Every structure is written in C-alpha cells, then in structure tokens.
C-alpha cells in the first residue's frame, strides 16, 4: 500500500470524522485544509481530499486543482460528504460532475453524513433558515420538499464507518 495523507475541509465535523476513519484504515495522517502548508505533500504517494458539499460544490475543491498542477504525477482520491442519501445517484453524479476534473480519472466517493445546525455559522445558518421558511410556504409539497423540510428541522448524523469501505478498497487495490 502507498504512503498517503488525507486533507479535508470540514465545517461541522462530519468530513473530519470521515478523514480520521480513512486515516486509521490506511495508516495515513489527516490534516485540515487550513494546515496544508505544514504538510510536505511531495513526501506522499497518494493524496486523499475530502470536503462537505454546499450547493453542489465541495468545500475546498480548488485544493485538488492546485495539487494536480503542482504534482501532476501524484495519485489523488476525492471524497465528498453531504446530507443527501448515499443511494441518491442523481445527486452523487451531479456532485461528481461539478467537482472532479473531467477526464482526470480521479476516483470519487460520496459519503452520507448529516446535518448539524448547532455547529453551522454565519451565512450557512441564514441560508438554512431562509430555505426552511420558503419550503414551509410551499403549498402541495411533493415528497422531496417534505423530506427536505423535515431534514432541516433538527440535527442528525447518518455517517457510518462502513461507508468508507469502497474508498479503502479502491486505494488498497491501486
């Protein structure tokens, strides 16, 4: 197996939890993106990057583009965490297509996490509050609108260590 590092951007703790689990399974260190300047990326064969999804974009994803330019021969894996269900293929594909560089061959994994309103800050909290009001005003809500509104009523955690198994298998098979 290769020498790896896990770099992550986490706002409410879910991505950090997954990064730590991945590090434990692969024997790699995990670092928040804000500390990446303290990490000697050139010393690693594999760089795993993870971030939470906001409006379809992975937080900190520019790190991947920068790393690909700086280290074109490095192996990179991307994972995203979000509140959407693991089996929501359309959402997962949309996140992948909006974030993974086209024709890069970079493996991508989506890991369901949760919603932690208490740890949200600033604009994130305001956006959720506005979305709750707007969804609450919708008459004749469809199933998706009802599910979204219910999901925003309180914090929950659907993260599971089992969800990292495909990523771990991918890395170990390289």
Image (spheres, rainbow, N blue to C red):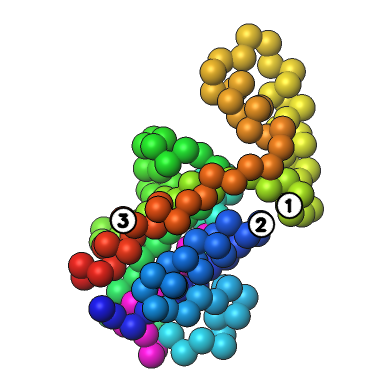
Was residue 48 drawn as part of the magenta stretch in this picture? yes
- The magenta stretch spans which residues? 42-51
Q: Give the labeled residue for mark 3.
A: 166
Is residue 99 at all visible to an observer of this figure? no
Q: Is residue 11 left or right of residue 129?
A: left
Q: Find residue 164 and report its image quarter.
A: bottom left
Q: Earlier in the sequence, mark 2 or mark 3?
A: 2
Q: Mark 1 points at which residue?
A: 120
Q: Distance between the residues labelled 1 and 2?
A: 6 Å
Image quarter of the N terminus? bottom left
Residue 157: tell me if it is visible: yes
Q: Where is residue 45 in the image (x, y as percent from the top left)?
A: 31, 82
CA–CA distance between discs 2 and 3? 24 Å
The residue at the point 36 percent across, 66 percent down is 77
**Residue 26 lies in the magenta stretch:** no
Residue depicted at x 37% and y 42%: 93
Quarter of the image where the C terminus is located: bottom left
Choose top left, top right, bottom left or bottom right for residue 155.
top right
The residue tagged 2 is 12
Q: Main secondary structure of the magenta part?
A: strand
* Vertical position of residue 15 compared to residue 31: above or below: above
**Mark 1 vs mark 2: which is more N-terminal?**
2
Q: Answer left or right for 165 relative to 33.
A: left
Q: Residues within 10 Å of mark 1 (few under 14, many from 20)?
A: some
């Amino acid at each position: 197996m290769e020498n790896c590092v896990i770099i992550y951007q986490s706002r409410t703790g879910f991505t950090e939890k997954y990064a730590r689990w991945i590090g434990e399974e692969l024997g790699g260190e995990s670092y928040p993106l804000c500390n990446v300047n303290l990490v000697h990326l050139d010393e690693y064969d594999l760089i795993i990057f993870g971030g939470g999804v906001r409006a379809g974009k992975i937080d900190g994803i520019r790190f991947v583009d920068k790393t690909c330019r700086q280290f074109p021969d490095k192996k990179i894996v991307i994972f995203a965490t979000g509140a959407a269900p693991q089996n929501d293929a359309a959402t997962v594909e949309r996140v992948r297509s909006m974030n993974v560089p086209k024709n890069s061959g970079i493996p991508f994994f989506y890991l369901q996490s949760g919603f932690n309103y208490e740890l949200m800050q600033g604009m994130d909290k305001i956006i959720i509050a506005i979305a709750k009001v707007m969804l609450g005003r919708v008459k004749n809500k469809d199933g998706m609108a009802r599910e979204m509104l219910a999901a925003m009523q309180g914090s929950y955690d659907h993260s599971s260590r089992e969800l990292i198994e495909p990523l771990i298998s991918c890395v170990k098979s390289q």
